[in-house]
Image (tube, helix red, strand yellow):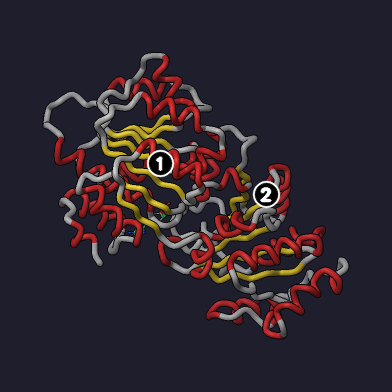
């Protein structure tokens, strides 16, 4: 299917062509007609599926079609999202897809001075993207109201709940007009989310795309067993292979992220860390440097990386394996986006072998192991690694399959 068969208006088709989008992703193909027809939507889709455009495109179109030229701008669409990073990305998406519509959007979030945000609101906007805290704050101060909202999008509803924003979300909903179109997006649908959706939506149409475990199938995944103390050395070794371009590296802790970034810098590899202890400006700067390819390696904690959206990110490295197996899928989902293949390398030390087993259970497959690198695991290797090996049978430790695995392996060994 092509975007041209979705009844989209020219200003939007033109912007999509400029973005280089030819075909809608499944969540877009399913959601856009629902929203254009005026129905409420309940979508089960995670980041990486193209969900932002799935709501941004039809909302822009509906707003454009009913926009009266010369009329004072009112906030007619509200997108509520849990994190600043997501808010910024959603704002960028509205700006990109809406660039020929004449509609104006802006983003508000906490942790930064509010004055530029209120000044922007005063000049008039059609679309507001907001995190809940700052939205309620600015409403309380009288800088904005939600009486003119015609379109309401709740993004990452399950994360809102996890992050303790449910009361804020309910306060926002209470301030919305009853007559409106609502779109509800969540990666998972636990009972509390279903309940929340029922209070917001009116006879919604439901759209569901690939569950979390199968997104992992698009990505070339590899495990490297290594001692804890050698993980940084192994990372440097991996990065000496220049065909491994820009890399997003995950660590479990903020401290760990800083340490890895400093270690890489000492080895003349440009790297920056991004985590919750850094100011919003420092995080945004690090992200921009990575996006513009000025920095080769971005080291991130899981929370900081939520929603990081880097086009054409080919490589993810997990320096530590995450405690929660779903986090592994979210991490590697940063690469191989919107259908293009990516590669994920995960370092695993003896203690982490049980975590590896949980991940393999979730994704229902064995992750191929790359052997023979210069820092093989020596810590109780026989004991720790054995259960994985015996379960997997002989096939588990063969060179990584796929077009890249074998090649990559040979190249690495050549450098020893
Ligand atoms: P999202 O799930 O909204 O975070 O989007 C994931 C990524 O896919 C973003 O980098 C988008 O720019 C990209 N994307 C969204 N829709 C398309 C499309 N139809 N074709 C190609 N890339 C897309």
Q: Position of residue 322 (x, y in %)?
A: 67, 55
- The residue positioned farthest toward the top in the image shown: 141
Q: Is residue 328 left or right of residue 154?
A: right
The answer to whether mark 2 and mark 1 are in CB contact below 8 A is no
Which is more toward the observer, 183 or 252?
183
Determine whether 122 is above or below 294 in the image: above
Q: How many numbered marks are there?
A: 2
Disc 2: which residue: 261
Q: Residue at x 79, y 71 (%)?
A: 385
Q: Is ligand 1 closer than 8 angstroms to the Cβ of mark 2?
A: no
Q: Is residue 347 left or right of residue 91?
A: right
- Could you say which disc has been placed on residue 197 in the image? 1
Q: Residue at x 64, y 68 (%)?
A: 360
Which is more toward the observer, 246 or 127?
127
Q: Secondary structure at mark 2?
A: helix
- Could you say which disc has been placed on residue 156 in the image? none
Query: Which quadrant of the structure image shows residue 352?
Result: bottom right
Query: Which quadrant of the structure image shows residue 198?
Result: top left
Q: Is ligand 1 closer than 8 angstroms to the Cβ of mark 1?
A: no
Q: Quadrant of the C terminus?
A: bottom right
Query: Which quadrant of the structure image shows residue 343?
Result: bottom right
Viewer-nearest of labels 2 and 1? 1
In terms of image quarters, where does ligand 1 lie? bottom left
Task: Mark yes or no: residue 310 visible.
Answer: yes
Q: CA distance from mark 2 to mark 1?
A: 41 Å
Q: Is residue 167 left or right of residue 128?
A: right
Q: Position of residue 311 (x, y in %)?
A: 44, 56
Q: Secondary structure at mark 1?
A: helix
Which is more toward the observer, 416 or 7?
7
Q: Position of residue 75 (x, y in %)?
A: 28, 28
Q: Residue at x 32, y 27 (%)?
A: 176
């Amino acid at each position: 299917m092509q975007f041209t068969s979705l009844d989209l208006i020219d200003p939007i088709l033109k912007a999509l062509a400029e973005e280089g989008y030819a075909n809608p992703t499944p969540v877009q193909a399913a959601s856009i007609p629902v929203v254009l027809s005026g129905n409420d939507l309940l979508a089960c889709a995670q980041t990486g599926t193209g969900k932002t455009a799935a709501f941004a495109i039809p909302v822009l179109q509906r707003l454009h079609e009913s926009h009266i030229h010369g009329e004072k701008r009112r906030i007619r669409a509200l997108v509520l999202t849990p994190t600043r990073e997501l808010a910024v990305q959603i704002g960028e998406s509205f700006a990109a897809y809406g660039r020929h519509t004449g509609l104006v959007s802006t983003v508000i979030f906490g942790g930064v001075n509010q004055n530029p945000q209120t000044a922007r609101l005063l000049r008039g906007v059609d679309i507001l993207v907001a995190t809940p805290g700052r939205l309620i704050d600015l409403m309380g101060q009288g800088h904005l109201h939600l009486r003119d909202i015609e379109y309401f999008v709740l993004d990452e509803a399950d994360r809102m709940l996890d992050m303790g924003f449910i009361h804020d979300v309910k306060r926002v909903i209470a301030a919305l007009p009853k007559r409106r179109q609502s779109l509800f997006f969540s990666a998972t649908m636990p009972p509390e989310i279903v309940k929340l959706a029922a209070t917001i939506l009116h006879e919604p149409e439901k759209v569901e795309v690939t569950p979390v475990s199968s997104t992992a199938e698009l990505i070339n995944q590899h495990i490297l067993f290594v001692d804890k103390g050698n993980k940084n050395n192994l990372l440097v070794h991996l990065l000496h292979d220049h065909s491994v371009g820009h890399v997003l590296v995950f660590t479990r802790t903020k401290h760990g992220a800083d340490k890895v970034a400093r270690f890489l810098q000492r080895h003349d590899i440009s790297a920056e860390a991004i985590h919750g202890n850094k100011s919003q400006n420092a995080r945004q700067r690090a992200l921009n440097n990575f996006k513009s390819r000025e920095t080769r390696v971005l080291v991130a904690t899981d929370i900081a990386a939520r929603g990081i959206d880097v086009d054409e990110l080919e490589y993810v490295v997990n320096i530590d394996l995450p405690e929660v197996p779903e986090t592994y899928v979210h991490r590697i989902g940063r690469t191989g986006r919107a259908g293009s293949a990516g590669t994920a390398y995960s370092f695993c030390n003896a203690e982490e072998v049980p975590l590896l087993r949980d991940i393999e259970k979730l994704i229902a497959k064995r992750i191929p192991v790359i052997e023979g690198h210069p820092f093989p695991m020596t810590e109780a290797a026989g004991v720790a690694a054995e259960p994985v090996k015996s379960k997997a049978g002989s096939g588990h430790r063969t060179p990584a399959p796929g077009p890249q695995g074998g090649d990559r392996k040979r190249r690495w060994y050549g450098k020893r």
